[in-house]
Amino acid sequence: MGFGMSGEALNLSISHLRERYRAGALDPAGLVAEIRARIGGEVPGPVWIHVLSEGELAPYLGRLAESDPDALPLYGIPFAIKDNIDLAGIPTTAACPDFAFRPDRSAHVVERLIAAGAIPIGKTNLDQFATGLVGTRSPFGATPNAFDPAYISGGSSSGSAVAVAGGLVSFALGTDTAGSGRVPAAFNNLIGIKPTRGLVSTSGVVPACRTLDCVSVFTLDLLDAEAVMAVAANFDPEDPFARRAVPPAEGGGAGHGTFRFGVPDSLEFFGDRESERLFESAVALLRDLGGEPVRLDFAPFEEAARLLYEGPWVAERYAAIEPFIERQPQSLLEVTRRIIAPGVEARAVDAFKAQYRLASLKRGTDALMEGLDFVVTPTAPTIYRMAEVESDPIVLNSRLGTYTNFMNLLDLAAVAVPAGFRADGLPFGVTLFGPAFSDSALVRYAERLHRAQDLPLGATGRQTSPLGTTTSVVATDPTGAPDAPGLNLVVCGAHLSGLPLNHQLTDRGGHLVSKTRTAPRYRLYALPGGPPHRPGLIRDPEGGAAIEVEVWHLPLEQVGGFLAGIPAPLGLGSLELEDGTWEKGFICEGYATAGAKDITDLGGWRAYRQP
């Protein structure tokens, strides 16, 4: 069960680990032991604040030892948690030791991930109280960039980003109020998902600005990001700021075809010609992928960005830790205190005036984005050395939020994507953003951009591929002739031949391999919602039946875009067919069956949909 040479980065992609688990070539305990050995004695330190001990990991590993890898969508997948997000029984510090407490319950999003089979490896370092975009504002040390330790890693979710970039976890949770889930992604060659506000619960998160906070996700590629978000994005009735997901619109150019994207009419790089060059290259690549760039007035976005720290929202940061900062102000780092303390002086009248101005700006920016599929900006205008930030911590930090601070104020969704490397070897990234609940479409556009560049994954040395893994599958067509590399997919609902979503396969060059049934170990449910109406297929070894399915083959270059558009609660997993073989296909999370109609006895979706 080795991973090759000791210095070689682990392949922790979700699809790779799932295949090894299913084949019996790996077990979660062995993987976790290898990860802990690689982390070594660095705790507490600049990346990790707390790594779970063998005893603390035992309950998670014990549960997985008794579980079927195919029954849990994130079975055995290791992840890290920013240390302002609760994990039951483990101290939450928010990078302030005097603030630390030991929660009895995990954050809602952590509970969901663990229930899906993911394994928490530890809590990661951050800019204290999530106040900063630099990754240097922590008593546990400044987190170094994964590519050059002389440079900053970005913050505030610095440890989470570097843990993923270094190949120590498959994914990590961060938070993002002003850019903390995107700037570290850009500086460490990662995907950074900043979802629509409220789409992922913030219950169990130490707040920065409660009305703006988001839980973010770092991964090496977008297929892993989609797999994580399919579990993490869940309405939490205990979170007063939670919002129910709005179903994404069908169609559009996200998976293929043409699209229109906005580009700011004025850009500030603070003299960084390398960042400017790479951004122009990203825009050119989007154009080559079928995009039509549209220049848009960026002034309203810039004004909204200034409101976050120059306006009364800093009072929210004060409110988040008011009892603590008033009782123990000396426990905060000086730079953190300098930013938060003035919040107590904010006037209510100024807060209302700022809300009125923000509403006006939002009306204007919504109009500017109308007719665009997304807007692209640099994720950060430049990057700084550790020493530079130490000498000018406030001004340089502020510059890093130029293209991130406005997002949550204007209720936007965003995805940070790697976009090449500078001449000095440091990564650069861009951000695609759009209106609230455009998350799925943004991921599909981002996947097209990422896949087209053939970049390394984080700092692991592994390369991207159209599947987001290091392997590909060669299939055969119905005549038995070799086909181009691709993937076989099992469909059971609206993608069946002649049904409403089948065109999503045929438009991508897909062809039918076989019509068959599953092994007699599945149940089929008609999920609420639609159109399009969708079924949910769930494995039930004890009381299941054989369900009608089709196996389709997709060309390799089309797989990523198709899979990235799979909406929750559906996901991709391994399905057992009636001949005993296993293929990838649509599966459904168990929670979605609440309120769904069990149609297993009908034998398939066609029989249910017949008038």
Image (cartoon, rainbow, N blue to C red):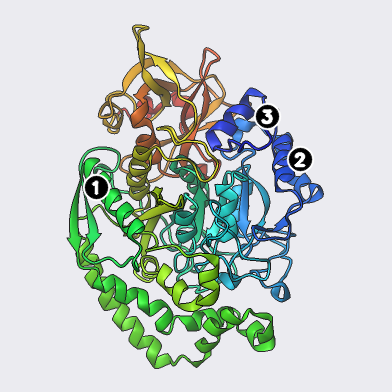
Q: Nearer the viewer, mark 2 or mark 1?
A: 1
Q: Amino acid at mark 3?
A: Leu
Residue in the image at 53% along x and 90% along y: 344
**82 left or right of 367?**
right
Report the residue marked by disc 1: 284
Circle 3: is it few (<14), some (14-19), or many (20+) Cα within 10 Å? some
Q: Amino acid at mark 1?
A: Ala
Q: Could you tell me residue 497's position as x and y percent?
A: 30, 23
Report the residue marked by disc 3: 26
Residue 194 lies in quadrant: bottom left
Residue nearest the viewer, comparing 383 with 27: 383
Residue 85 visible in the displayed image: yes
Residue 299 lies in quadrant: bottom left
Tag 3, which secondary structure? loop
Tag 1, which secondary structure? helix
Q: CA distance from mark 1 to mark 3?
A: 43 Å
158 to 564, vertically: above or below: below
Residue in the image at 35% along x and 8% along y: 481
Q: Amino acid at mark 2?
A: Gly
